[in-house]
Amino acid sequence: MLHCGCSSKSHLVPCSGLAMIDTNLLNTLLSNFLQSSSEITGALIVDVDGLILAQQSVQSLNEAMIGAMMSVLEQTMTKIKRFASTSYGSGTFDTNDFRIFYIELGGKRPSIFVMVCDAYANLERLIPFSYLAAEKASLILHSRSTSAELPNYAPSGDQIITVEKGGDFQGKAIKLMMTGQEEVGKSSLVDMYFDGDFHSGYRPTIGVSYRSQDLQVMSQISLRFHVFDLSGMKAFAKVRRFYYTGADLILIMFDYTNMETMTFAGDWLEEAKHFNNNRSCRYLLIGNKIDLISDREALFEKAGDFARQRDLQLFNISSKTGEGIDEIFMHVFSLYC
């Protein structure tokens, strides 16, 4: 049976053994998502027991419509229950009245993000955009710091996702991409630099994570970073290409405790250059987890050779302790200020 966990009297929903869910922030996120495109008619977050944790729609989704969706998702819910935190699939299905795309959110609080569109919606463009909202929903469900802000959706043209590089902001706006294999520490670098936080538990990024952050470099100079943190998981490889367009700065990260990830950094560089149309984009190579290695000199030399062969500047950091991270952004400031 379908249950709704939302209430006008409470913004928090309890979940067994886990922290409360901020349904107010979830619903604000879904509301912003709906406002991004007239083709999106509804959005829901549903747990594996059929409890609707958050729901927003242009017009009320009647119970029959929701029931039809839930019957289609029932098989997915059964699979998620079996595989719990390791399930990150997605799928689409159509009816005479609407088109639906869903994403499994995985993690310790497995749920499903559901996007409901009109029957003529262009899902090829909307699906990459929906991952931005799905990842933020996953962060909220896991009590991680995030906002309900989303970049702009473009219904036509070369770019599906755009960011403001002007408007009321008087400084310089930079589209920054984080790339690299899974578990190398991309999200941890972002969290450490902008929030001063480090989360020890690994939680894969659902497709792509987005945030914007203003930094005052000097009294007269401000930078606005639009950060797109790409998932390194193979399950999300097909959608990554949609996020590169217009990037100003791309950080390609590897893990010193797993040097195979440095070999793959070359593939990430090729992918980025292939899909990014900004020929003035800067590329930096980031070696992470230096706090966990003993033979630094030999590994740094190997990474240095790898960087020089590809005309990349190398920065060695620890996203856990923060060592070396300031040097990255001091270099960025020197490039754009």
Image (cartoon, rainbow, N blue to C red):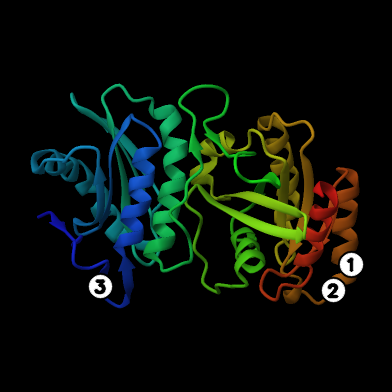
**Which residue has dot 1 on it?**
298
Q: Is residue 83 visible?
A: no
Taking the spot 84% from the left edge, 74% from the top edge, the residue there is: 295
Question: Distance from label 3 to label 2 (Cα)?
Answer: 47 Å
* Residue 143 at x, y percent in the picture: 41, 69
Taking the spot 78% from the left edge, 45% from the top edge, the residue there is: 283
Nearest to N terminus: mark 3 or mark 1? 3
Taking the spot 63% from the left edge, 61% from the top edge, the residue there is: 190
- Kind of residue indicated by mark 3: Pro
**Which residue has dot 3 on it?**
14
* For the residues bearing labels 2 and 1, Cβ distance under 8 angstroms: yes
**Is 163 drawn above or below residue 10 in the view shown?**
above
- Kind of residue indicated by mark 2: Asp
Q: Tag 1, which secondary structure?
A: helix
The 10 Å Cα crowd at callout 1, few under 14, some 14 to 19, many 20 or more, is few
Q: Tag 3, which secondary structure?
A: strand
* Residue 281 at x, y percent in the picture: 76, 38
Which tag is nearer the camera, tag 3 or tag 1? 3
**Which residue has dot 2 on it?**
295
* For the residues bearing labels 3 and 1, Cβ distance under 8 angstroms: no
* Occupied quadrant, residue 54: bottom left
**Is 288 drawn above or below residue 205 in the view shown?**
below
Nearest to N terminus: mark 3 or mark 2? 3
- Kind of residue indicated by mark 1: Ala
